[in-house]
Every structure is written in structure tokens, then in C-alpha cells.
Image (spheres, helix red, strand yellow):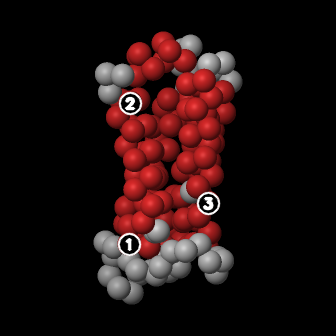
Amino acid sequence: MDILTIVLVLTLLGHGIGHVMGFLASWTKLPMGFTQSPWIFSKGILIQSVVGKAFGILWLISMGAFIAAAIGLFTGQSWWTSVAIIASFLSLLAFLPWWNTFTPGSKQAAVLVDVVVIAVLLGPWKDELLARIGGG
């Protein structure tokens, strides 16, 4: 396994595990460093509201999908790219409505990873990437 594959596996895994913060922020009282500010929704809909909890489930699903994609890539499965793309779209869907609740550094990094995954795996670079890491 080459260094690029290891970096990609660790990136997908780390980004996936990071989604636990959104889930915990919406489902527990644990301090995650997030605020209760909404973005798209009215002021009455906060991260720990019923709507926020529904988005917390999306964060949890995204987490599982990113971890699955990392495992798929690590074990040489061809489906990992589809799962990574789906995970990235779900991640953005779960994240963007709550933009104001996240800490500044985490929101830019999270969106960057999602956008790069989508751009690379749906763009003209996909075949080159897969050739460099040994298939997919």
C-alpha cells in the first residue's frame, strides 16, 4: 500500500470520526464548542431541537459512510468511491444548515474535505487517482 492510499484512508477515517461532534452536539448536552445559532432555520430551531436531532442522525450516517469508505479503500474494494461521494454529499447536507454553530476552523476544513472528495471522485481526476492507488 502506497503513501497516497494511506493518506486517503486516514483522511476519510478522520473526517468520518469528526462527524461524531455534530451528532453529539444535537443529541447530548456534552460541550462540543458549538453555539445554538441556527443558519437556514428560524431562531426557534436550534441544534438540540427535533430538527437538529434529525440532522444529527445525518451526521451519524455520514460518519458511518466515511468510515466504510475508508475501510473499502484500505481493503481494495471497488465500491469505496461511491460510498465516499455519498458520504460527502450527506456531510454537506447535514453541515451547511448549521454553519453558524460550528467552530471557525472546523467548518472550513470539513467543507474543504467534502468538496475535494466530490470534485476528485466525480471529476476528471478520478481515473488518475484510482490508477495511482491501485484500482477502485
Label whose residue precedes the other's in the sequence (1 or 3): 3
**Disc 1 or disc 3, which is closer to the eye?**
1
Which residue lies at the image location 50% right of the left edge and 37% below the top edge? Answer: 84
In the drawing, does residue 94 fall left or right of residue 119? right
Disc 3 and disc 2: Cα gap in Å?
24 Å
- Residue beneath disc 3: 20
Q: Dot 2, how many residues are within 10 Å of its Cα: few (below 14), some (14-19), or many (20+)?
A: some
Q: Is residue 39 visible?
A: yes
The quarter of the picture where the N terminus appears is top right
Q: Dot 3, how many residues are within 10 Å of its Cα: few (below 14), some (14-19), or many (20+)?
A: many
The residue under label 1 is which amino acid type?
Asn
Which residue lies at the image location 66% right of the left edge and 77% below the top edge? Answer: 30
Q: Relative to 123, does residue 57 appear above or below in the rendering? A: below
Residue 31 in the image, given as x and y percentages of width and height: 62, 77
- Residue beneath disc 1: 100
In the drawing, does residue 18 fall left or right of residue 98? right
Q: Dot 1, how many residues are within 10 Å of its Cα: few (below 14), some (14-19), or many (20+)?
A: some
Which residue lies at the image location 59% right of the left edge and 72% below the top edge? Answer: 32
Disc 1 and disc 3: Cα gap in Å?
18 Å
The residue under label 3 is which amino acid type?
Val
- Residue beneath disc 2: 120
Q: Secondary structure at mark 3?
A: helix
